[in-house]
Structure formats: C-alpha cells, structure tokens
Amino acid sequence: MKKVLKVFIEITNYCNFNCIYCFANHCNKNSIIMPFNKYKKIIDDLSTLDFDLSIILTGGEPLFVDNICEYGKYARKYAKKVSLGSNGSFIPTLKQEKLDDIKNTFDQIYLSFDSTNPKLFEKLANHSIEPVLKAIDILNKNEIKIKLTPVVTKYNVEFDSIIKFCEDKGIKKLRFFWFIPREATDHSLSPSEKDYEYMMERFNNYKGDIDVKIDRYYNPPFSALIISPSGKIVILSDLERKNTETIGTYDNFIDNLKAKLEQHNS
C-alpha cells in the first residue's frame, strides 16, 4: 500500500480575510495567481512520485480564482483525493452552476472556522461570521462535504462548542490545527501546554460520531509540502512545524523532493 503525500498548493495569495494568526499576512499583499501552465507542470511532476497524492488547493482564498475548478479537475488526473481549502465567504455569491462544478470536482471543502462566537470570530478573522454561516448552509443544501478546520490560538481553545456546532450543522469531519508560530507570526498567540492538555482531555473523552483530529505535530515530509503561488516550494522540516526548508521552485523542485523522500525512508 502506497504512503500518502499531502500537498498544499496555494493557488493565490489574495484573501479577503485578515486572520491574526496567518503567516501570509506578513508577506507581499499584491495579488498573485499561480499560472495554470506552471500548476500543470507541478501536478505532472508530483505524479512521478511513488505516493498516493492528496492535493489541497488553498490560498489565500482560492475561490477568488474564477477557474479554480479547472485546477481541481487537472489534479484529479493523478491525485487520489482533491480538496479545496476556503474561508467560505465567497460561497453565498456563487451561482448554482458553479456550486455544481465544485461538488463534481472536489472531494471536500476544508472550511476555516475558528469560533462559534461571532465577536471572537471577527476578532480572529477581521471579518464577519455571517457569510460563512450562510456558506455552510449552502454547502449542506448542495451535499458538498465539509471538513471544519479551526486554528487553535490562545483565544479560541474551544472543543465542546465546535463539536455542538458540527452536530447541529451535520458536519462529520473536524480537524483542529494547533497554532505553531513560524516566520513572522505573532508568537504570543500560541496556546499553552495546559490548553493542549485540556483539548486532548476533551478529545479523548469524546464519544460522538464526528471524525475529530487535533494536529499539533506532523510527520515530515509527509503532510507537509507547501507550494506557493510565487513559485517557492517548501517542506516543514521538523515535527512541530516551526521550521521550513525550501526545496526549489516550479522548475526544479522534483529531484530535490525525491531525494528528501528517499532520505526520509532510509
């Protein structure tokens, strides 16, 4: 059985949210969209690896890109699973034809949703919760699968309220991403060890039927390949996801990645 290589491809750096924990907030805010021909080369190169590919198209906000489904359809040629990572705010503006296209292209949507409390949500995202709530109802109506993906900072150490929200909305998958500061992000946002112990206690005692995960550590380089719209390709090079290692650009990353994967397996 092949191992899974999870690849996060940032199709654009544009985002209409301004989340306080997002490392992209400290980067160049000029809008960049990954050229489709470069994207195809990335997918083609990844297909030469002896792995089952799980491709997540993200950003920024990928629904800012009009032809995002074309990106997804090309990934489906080779990937075992293709997902879309979104904040959801554009979904209420989409026509039914586009919603049908999303449903037929992506296996699920990773939906950023950091708190059930509207005021706290706005503090974290610098954006209203209302369009995201509408988006969830629209996705459910269209039977588009949702995986809720809160990022846990010191401000939103929530478990029970998020679980109840998922139960109320019929969301079956929930993955808490533990905030890990890197690059220029604000280290003061980090949750404490007591916060982690609390979350793990609630997680271990949870007996419901929602598929719940808490991601604090990764097993690099698997689940840790990030490709930016500007062409830089990095892996998270330690278990705690604090450090990144550049392995190339669109044009020259694949040999370096193969060497890194072989080194990891040796």
Image (cartoon, rainbow, N blue to C red):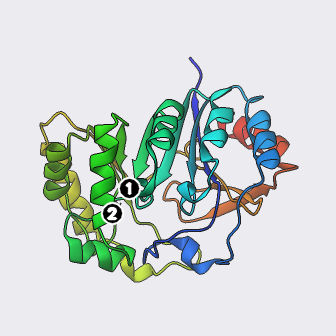
Q: Tag 2's secondary structure?
A: helix
Q: Which residue is drawn at 82% across and 51% down?
A: 250
Q: Can residue 265 be seen in this view?
A: no
Q: Tag 1's secondary structure?
A: helix
- For residue 145, above or below residue 148: above
Q: Is disc 2 surrounded by few (<14), some (14 to 19) or many (20+) residues within 10 Å?
A: some
Residue corresponding to mark 2: 131
Asked if labels 2 and 1 touch by Cβ distance under 8 angstroms, the answer is yes
The C terminus - image quarter: top right
Q: Which residue is drawn at 75% across and 63% down?
A: 230
Q: Is residue 79 visible?
A: yes
For the view shown, which residue lies furthest in the right direction?
251
Residue 65 x, y percent position in the rendering: 62, 56
Residue corresponding to mark 1: 92
Image quarter of residue 205: top left
Residue 159 x, y percent position in the rendering: 19, 56
Residue 117 x, y percent position in the rendering: 19, 69
The N terminus - image quarter: top right
| Left or right of 32 on screen, residue 62 | left
Inter-mark Cα distance, 1 to 2: 7 Å
Q: Residue at x 17, y 49 (%)?
A: 163
Toward the viewer: 85 or 195?
A: 85
| Residue 21 numbered mark, or none | none
Q: Is disc 1 surrounded by few (<14), some (14 to 19) or many (20+) residues within 10 Å?
A: some
| Left or right of 223 on screen, residue 129 | left
Residue 174 x, y percent position in the rendering: 30, 45
- For residue 184, above or below residue 221: below
Q: Which of marks 1 and 2 is nearer the N terminus?
A: 1
- For residue 203, above or below residue 26: above
**Amino acid type at mark 1:** Pro
